[in-house]
Image (cartoon, grey):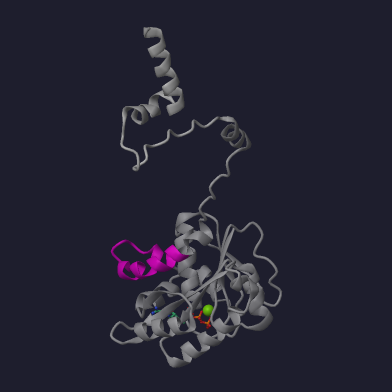
Amino acid sequence: MGTLAVVSRKGGSGKSTVATNLAVYLARRTNSVTLGDLDHQQSMRVWLARRPSAAPQVAGWVGDSARLARPALGTQHLVLDTPGGLHGLGLARVVMAADAILLPVGGSVFDRESASDCWNELRSQPRIMKGQCRVAAIGMRVDARTHVERITAEWAASVNIPYIASLRMAQIYVRAVENGISLFDMPDNVGATDREQWQPLLSWAEPVFFPQPKAEPLSASLRLAAKVVPLRPLPHPPTHAQPADRTTAAAPVLGTPGRLSRLLSGLKLSRR
Ligand SMILES: Nc1ncnc2c1ncn2[C@@H]1O[C@H](COP(=O)(O)OP(=O)(O)OP(=O)(O)O)[C@@H](O)[C@H]1O
Ligand SMILES: [Mg+2]
């Protein structure tokens, strides 16, 4: 089972927007996706209630960051939406449950300062230090006419957090939430630019939900066969110091030079 949590201390940074869009993307690839909500505002419930019945279904689960011990039973893929201001034990519990965490960051210096505080707390968690839970930042509501994307990328580099995607400010996100849908429910000709911006994020999240099977170790019988099959010794190549003569040239075919000279002397003897 793969679990990805969307975490940010800052209210309104886009956590629920990222979580709902990611959940629908996964629901289109697999039929077992749960959108978990640790937020007492329960935005997820509002969104799910508006979701058209014909759209790929996402199960809902309401958790509690104060008691989160494990994800919903029977869940295969869990996207966890979290409340703003999560820290301390609540944050540590989310890290315990998650394989990956996305940190949405807005364009203001306040957003970056808040994200730095959150990242500092996250990076001291043992699971994150050991690489068992990956963390990356994404730029939210990025206005392409400004330097926000560059500034956010520079901030990310300065605090040493991977910066994997920038999602532009677009009304399509607001309209999607209103209708209980996501970018990934829309027809090909609507929202293509925005879906394109999601690609690096989706590639980053891919191993969380669809891990590659590990290479099979060599079976016991193959290991045994490898031990008992005798290996032919490689013939000695002629050395550069010696001029190539017939004796050394013939060695690879007939065997060692000693064996060859014995054969030759045998021939001489039989001619007499
Ligand atoms: N890329 C975007 N472009 C335009 N509007 C956006 C974008 N992303 C999010 N929004 C809007 O910003 C508002 C806040 O987003 P959202 O509810 O996802 O934030 P949040 O972090 O979950 O907030 P909270 O902390 O209150 O739970 C919503 O109205 C949402 O539609
Ligand atoms: Mg929210």
Q: Characterize the magenta stretch by its predominant secondary structure.
A: helix
Residue 29 in the image: x percent, y percent? 46, 55
Apparent side of residue 3 relative to residue 93 in the rendered image (left or right): left
Apparent side of residue 78 relative to residue 106 in the rendered image (left or right): right
Viewer can see residue 74: yes
Q: Residue at x 60, y 68 (%)?
A: 98
Q: Nearer the viewer, residue 68 or 271?
A: 271
Q: Residue at x 47, y 66 (%)?
A: 22
Question: With respect to residue 173, does 59 lie above or below?
Answer: above
Q: Nearer the viewer, residue 260 or 217?
A: 260
Q: Residue at x 37, y 86 (%)?
A: 151
Question: With respect to residue 129, does 233 lie above or below?
Answer: above
Outermost bottom residue: 110
Q: Does the magenta-highlighted stretch encompass residue 107?
A: no
Q: Nearer the viewer, residue 42 or 196?
A: 196
Q: How many numbered marks appear?
A: 0
Residue 170 in the image: x percent, y percent? 35, 78
Question: With respect to residue 95, does 209 lie above or below?
Answer: above
Question: With respect to residue 77, does 47 lie above or below?
Answer: below
Name which quarter of the figure residue 217 lies in: top right
Q: Tell me where the magenta segment starts and ends, as one range.
A: 183-204
